[in-house]
Amino acid sequence: MLERNPYSQPLQPAGRTTLDTVKRNRRNRNRFLILIILALTAFLLWRSIWQFERSEPGNDIVPAPPVAELHPVVLAKQKELLAETAKIGISVLITDGFRSSEEQDSLYAQGRTADGAVVTQVQGGNSYHNYGLAIDFALRTKEGEVVWDMKYDGNRNGEADWMEVVAAAKRLGFSWGGDWDNFPDYPHLQMDFGYTIRQLKRGLRPPVE
Ligand SMILES: [Zn+2]
């Protein structure tokens, strides 16, 4: 058998081969560029969606460490409430303020798995008390007795003291649990600063000056 002579076959014209290679290279480069552009577009799209989600009202606040006390604004308003109601002859007792998630859970157990009456409808992490944004109040009579009597008129002005406290609290910016349709909570006053429980659970907090 004859050795195959590499020169016996007509060579492809050198120019043609180079042109093919250039074309193939260009095609590969274009494919690569399209991939890069697609990836970049996807990234930018994802980023803008992410930023849009973060721009929900109240989401511009940096997540804060766990809350362990009443929000300073709520505390200041609570003091104002005590002062204002004292002026009209009503002694208000704050029975509860900040409540930890664990305390909330044991309160939730009350009347369910534990003795006592049901006092709350929400479990730990689901109450504004757990974020230092709610207080509960009661009235103290002239005799020093603590009452939850919504008709009690200790200052004898013909109006129920309880509703006078609620009116003063609302003027100070509190919302009242007694206005809730499902499970009215008459001793409950809160300031949510526009934050939903969902946002608070996600670690967002109203700003503290
Ligand atoms: Zn409450």
Image (cartoon, helix red, strand yellow):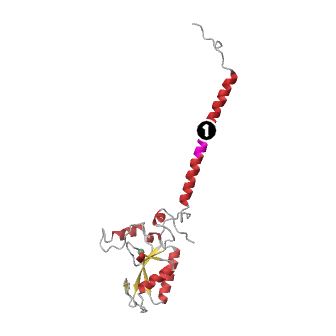
| Residue at (65, 34) in percent of width and height | 26
Q: Does residue 142 appear left or right of residue 56 in this picture?
A: left
Whole-percent x, y for residue 165 in the image:
45, 83
Query: Looking at the picture, which amino acid does disc 1 mark?
Result: Phe
Q: Residue at x 66, y 19 (%)?
A: 12
Image quarter for ligand 1: bottom left
- Which residues are drawn in magenta? 31-39
Write down the residue under mark 1: 32
Report the front residue among 123 and 47.
47
Where is 38 relative to 144, above or below? above
Question: Which residue reaches farthest top?
Answer: 1
Q: Is residue 203 above or below residue 35?
A: below
Q: Residue at x 43, y 84 (%)?
A: 163
Q: Secondary structure at mark 1?
A: helix
Q: Is residue 134 magenta?
A: no
Q: Badge 1 local density, few (<14 within 10 Å), some, or many (20+)?
A: few
